[in-house]
Every structure is written in C-alpha cells, then in structure tokens.
Image (cartoon, rainbow, N blue to C red):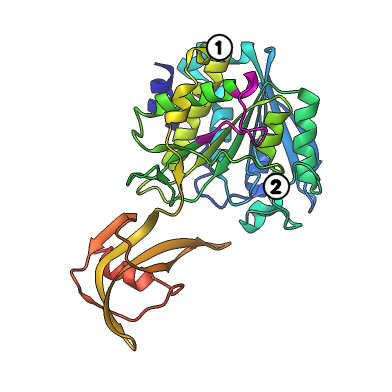
Amino acid sequence: MFVKQLFDNYELYKEKSLAHRRIKHKDILPLVLKRSSVFKVQEVGKSFEGREIFVLKTGTGKTKVMLWSQMHGNEPTATQTLFDIFNLFEKPKSLQTEINEILKACTLYFIPMLNPDGAEQFKRRNAQDIDINRDALRLAAPESNILMNLRDKLNADFGFNLHDQDIWYSAGNTKNPATLSFLAPTFNTAKDIDEKRKKSMQLIVSINNMLQEFIPGQTAKYDDTFMPTAFGDNIQKRGTSTILIESGGYKNDVEKQFVRKLNFISILHALKQIANKSFHKERVSLYDKIPFNKKNKLFDFILRNTTISGKFGEYNADIGIRSRSLIEKDIFTVDDIGDLSQNNAFYEVDLKKKKIQQIKIGANAQKLIGAFFTK
C-alpha cells in the first residue's frame, strides 16, 4: 500500500525545478537553503573549486542511514530523487504515518551532490580529474575526504551509494534494459558474506521484489568483483551495510524522469523496510537469482539489414547508434557497423537491404535517425 501510494501520488512531491539531467550546484543551492525545520542543513566542506557540499539531516531514530548522490558529476538522477524525498518528508500529506515511522526509527543523512565541480562540466570526474569512486584509500580529493569522514563520524548502519549507469546495459541475456541495477558490494576478493553484507543483500531482494510490479524483468545486479579502491567496497568493509543503486535506461525516458520516480519508490521502500526491520525475512539466495548487467548489449537505435554502398563496394550490415553526452547536450553517433543480430535497441527498423551511403563509426547519425525513425 505504501509503495502504491508513493507511485500514484509522486507528482505531489516531485521537485519541478529539476526537470533535466544537466543540473548544477547553482540549481540545487536554493533548494538546499530553503529547507524547513524538518531538516538540519550543514555545510560539511567544499569541493576542489570551492563549491559548498551539504549534509541534510532528519529523523531521531537509533538506526543511522547515509545516502549520497552525484559522486560522478554526470550522474544526476538520484540527486533529483533526493529533492523529491525532501519534499515528501516536509509535506507528507496522506503518508504522514509512514514517514513518522521512518523518522522515529532512523536518523537520515543526505549528501545530494558530492561532486559539484563535475556536475558543472557534466563529467564523471572532479576538477582534479580524479574519479572520486576510486579514491577511497588515498583520499586525494576533498570530496572523498568529506564522504569518508562522514561515514567514520557516524559509523552509519546503512549507506546508499546512488549512481547512474549507461542506458545500454541489459538485464541479463534479455532484450530488456537494466532500468535499475543493484549491488551489495564485496569487502574482499573471496566475496565473503558477513552480517552487514547479508543485510545489504536482503534489502536489495526486498527492493527488487517490489519493483517487479512496475518494471518486470528490467532489474539487474552490478558486477560484484572486489574493487580495492572503490568507496562502496570500503564502506562495506568498514561495517556499513551498503546498497548501490544504478539508474539505467527506460524506453522513451531520455531525461530519466520515470527512472527518477522508480528511485523515489525504491529508496523510500527501503527506508521503511529498515525502520520496521521487515527486510530481515528475505532470503539471501534470491539475491543470487537477480541477473547480472550485460554491458553494451543495447543501442539507442539499430538500422538492421542495410546495404552499405561506397568505395568498398556493397555489403550487408547493421548500423548501431548511441548517444554521446557533451556538456550542453547529447548527440547521436554511429557506434558500430556489422552483424548486430545479438544486440537489441530501444528503437529498431529493418531496412530490407535498402542502400545506405558509406558511413564511418563515429559519424554524426542525426540524419539517419531523421530519415528512418521520426516519420
């Protein structure tokens, strides 16, 4: 009932000012500073270029949960979601009872944008060109220090590591996109399961079961190879039950606004499960049944069965097209040419050997898209 209400009433809580992916620090700053007394807002440091990084705290419960987003500057979906969640906590409307339950059982700590310098350039890394998510040991970036210091200060019980992944991952060996992917990070190469990691797995099972009502067959599990320098692995190693959530692709959702909504219900479902401890009943064995991501199985567009004509003569080939993100916008380029019978796409057309002028990988594909997909 709680999840259905969240899903059905989402527009009441959605932060309308964050409607596109290329959000910057200046976009969230007024939203952070305007928070009501439900939240305690604290500046906990600055980025390499001097932009403020904030923690928003709410709740009075014994269980400490930290959630951080946009560690990679071009991964903003969960950042948008967190502001939706802030709106819900401040004005829960018909969900007051459920929100009170969460806030009574938990104390929540949110970092909505850990890498504001990367967000400014819509790039993965920070201003030093350090991948913050691979800086958990050296802590060379100021942003890395902020995150690890918060974890250590709180000794948090749970941590939500919120990211975006490429939209071209599939859910296992299916045609379906991996719209949301999860991981209970390992803390050693043996991939051992201690009590903390077990809780991560059980919570993911609970989220995954819930999501099948909304995106059946479109969830996956992220690669669980131990990464010695990664934050998720090290935070798990330090004793915080960590849940990685990766926002992937969904058809007709270029700005990932439906995926944002799925994040909203997933995170809140998880917080309620933590509050009432109901996730403990989930079987760890079901975590292993979630399929792994399959990388680069999908394209945005595939032109199938073309006849390519040019200086190399004529030959049959498929053409795969993917988007490429620039600071200002996405552009579409030819990403592969050849036999793509083992791949799928959000949009496909069989050209039945129609002739296409010779084209190179990397070429702008906008004319092809316009010719075959926008009529």
Q: Nearer the viewer, mark 2 or mark 1?
A: 2
Q: Which mark is residue 75?
A: none
At 32% from the left edge and 56% from the top edge, which residue is drawn? 342
- Quarter of the picture containing the C terminus is bottom left
- Location of the N terminus (image quadrant): top left
Instruction: Residue 347: give x, y in percent of width and height.
Output: 30, 56
* Residue type, mark 2 in image: Arg
What's the amino acid at mark 1?
Lys
Circle 2 packing at 10 Å, graded few (<14), some (14-19), many (20+), is some
Measured from the top left, where is residue 58 in percent x and y? 67, 21
Is 338 located above or below residue 48 in the figure?
A: below
The magenta-colored residue range is: 182-197
Q: Which residue is mark 2?
A: 134
Asked if 54 appears above or below 265 in the picture, the reply is below
Q: Which x, y percent locates residue 346?
A: 33, 53
In the drawing, does residue 220 fall left or right of residue 61? left
State whether residue 281 appears in this view. yes
Residue underneath mark 1: 277
Report the side of 268 relative to 252 (left or right).
right
Rendered residue at 74%/56% (across/down): 127
In depth, the one of 17 and 212 nearer the eye is: 212
Query: Dot 1 surroundings within 10 Å: few (below 14), some, or many (20 or more)?
Result: few
Is-magenta flag for residue 188?
Answer: yes
Residue at 33% across / 33% down in the picture?
216
Q: Give the residue furthest to the bottom.
A: 311
Q: Main secondary structure of the magenta part?
A: loop
Q: Does the magenta segment cover residue 106?
A: no
Let me know if residue 265 appears in the view: no
Disc 2, disc 1: CB below 8 Å? no
